[in-house]
Image (cartoon, coloured by chain):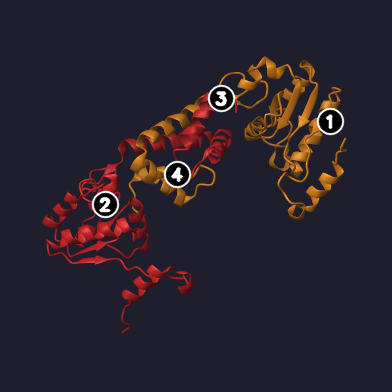
Chain colours: A red, B orange
């Protein structure tokens, strides 16, 4: 295909976005060029600004442009004494949307995966341990993904917390609301049986 | 949700891309921030560069960063004397991929749509007419979309070309290859009957 070099470059660059292949990249490029030049410039500015200024919160390791993220800046959130451990910033967003958790977070930015060279150091677990030592932690909620690596990471952190006599819990796994027992896999179903709760 | 302002801004800006809603925008933003900072900066540069330098080819109105697009710059392509009229630059890319057309293009950047205020002037049809007058046009191939507006645009341009005694053709409409007669709509099927070709 014979595009101008700048368009070729744009189409190639857009494919760095997740889920964007050559065809959607081409559609995006033409959409911007045809109708959204001003928004395109704005998008370019937003991306380069974010890449430059976003770092990690010193306390919870979530993305933040200041030293502390908005949640760790809030004394109301920090004073609850509950820490929820999640794998990614997207998980923080998902839990915030439930409006059921009012404590602070610790974002691992991944999970333990020795084969990929990701150990406790890469997840900055020393910073979490530091929080165990310095803060009054009333409860540690482990909300890593229910995958092999997520479970292993949860157990590792639970062990660490027990050394500080901290109460540790794991989010419940079971049949999702609106789901049908019939269509849920066996492992999830056994989890939901093992984790059954008594009705008052 | 409590993101940092720069992340909020990035997620909002990404939604200018076609087919990108709040959720995929968030996924894209986190993907760039977590793993692709350098590529992100490169993407920002590509976008702002393209928005700045890409204009329209003086001859065919396709996107070009110089005065002429690569196709109009090629004497081999221009000398064929065939002009293919398409609605968008993406259509040029699609036809180029077939490697069946060796002439030049004229890109309308839309179609006639009086209700939206898009008339011959907005499509720069005067530039096409100028080419009829100045170039040796052996054949004009109308490859606008087979929609009501595309057909109307094709007829309008055909009328214009006839005034210059130019041979005009319309791309064939019919059953797509690999398709099944059964699953093709009635209008397409009648087109494929009307446009039937004798086997030698």
Q: For the point 67% across and 21% down, which residue is it? A: B59
Q: Are marks 3 and 4 in contact (CB under 8 Å)?
A: no
Please check whether the numbered discs 1 and 3 fall on a single chain.
Answer: no
Mark 4 Cα shell of 10 Å, populated few (<14), some (14-19), many (≥20): some
Q: How far apart are the two marked residues, 1 and 3, measured between alpha carbons?
A: 32 Å
Residue named by callout 1: B159
Q: Earlier in the sequence, mark 4 or mark 2?
A: 4
Residue named by callout 4: A18
The subunit carrying tag 1 is B
Q: Is residue A165 above or below residue B146?
A: below
Quadrant where the N terminus of chain A is found in the figure: top right
Question: Residue B53, image x and y in percent?
Answer: 52, 24
Nearer the camera: disc 1 or disc 2:
2
Nearer the camera: disc 2 or disc 3:
2
Question: What kind of element bears circle 1?
Answer: helix
Q: Which mark is residue A4?
A: 3
Nearer the camera: disc 4 or disc 2:
2
Residue named by callout 2: A112
């Amino acid at each position: 295909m014979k595009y101008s070099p700048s368009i070729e470059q744009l189409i190639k660059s857009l494919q760095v976005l997740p889920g964007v292949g050559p065809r959607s990249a081409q559609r995006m490029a033409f959409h911007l060029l045809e109708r959204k030049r001003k928004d395109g410039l704005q998008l370019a500015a937003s991306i380069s600004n974010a890449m430059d200024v976003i770092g990690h919160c010193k306390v919870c390791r979530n993305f933040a442009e200041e030293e502390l993220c908005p949640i760790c800046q809030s004394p109301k959130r920090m004073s609850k004494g509950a820490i929820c451990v999640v794998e990614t910033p997207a998980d923080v967003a998902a839990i915030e949307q439930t409006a059921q958790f009012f404590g602070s977070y610790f974002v691992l930015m991944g999970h333990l995966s020795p084969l990929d060279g990701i150990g406790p150091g890469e997840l900055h677990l020393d910073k979490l341990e530091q929080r165990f030592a310095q803060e009054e932690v009333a409860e540690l909620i482990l909300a890593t993904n229910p995958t092999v690596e997520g479970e292993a990471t949860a157990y590792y952190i639970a062990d660490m917390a027990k050394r500080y006599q901290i109460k540790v819990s794991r989010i419940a796994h079971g049949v999702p609301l609106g789901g049908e027992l019939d269509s849920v896999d066996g492992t999830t179903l056994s989890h939901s049986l093992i984790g059954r709760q008594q009705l008052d």
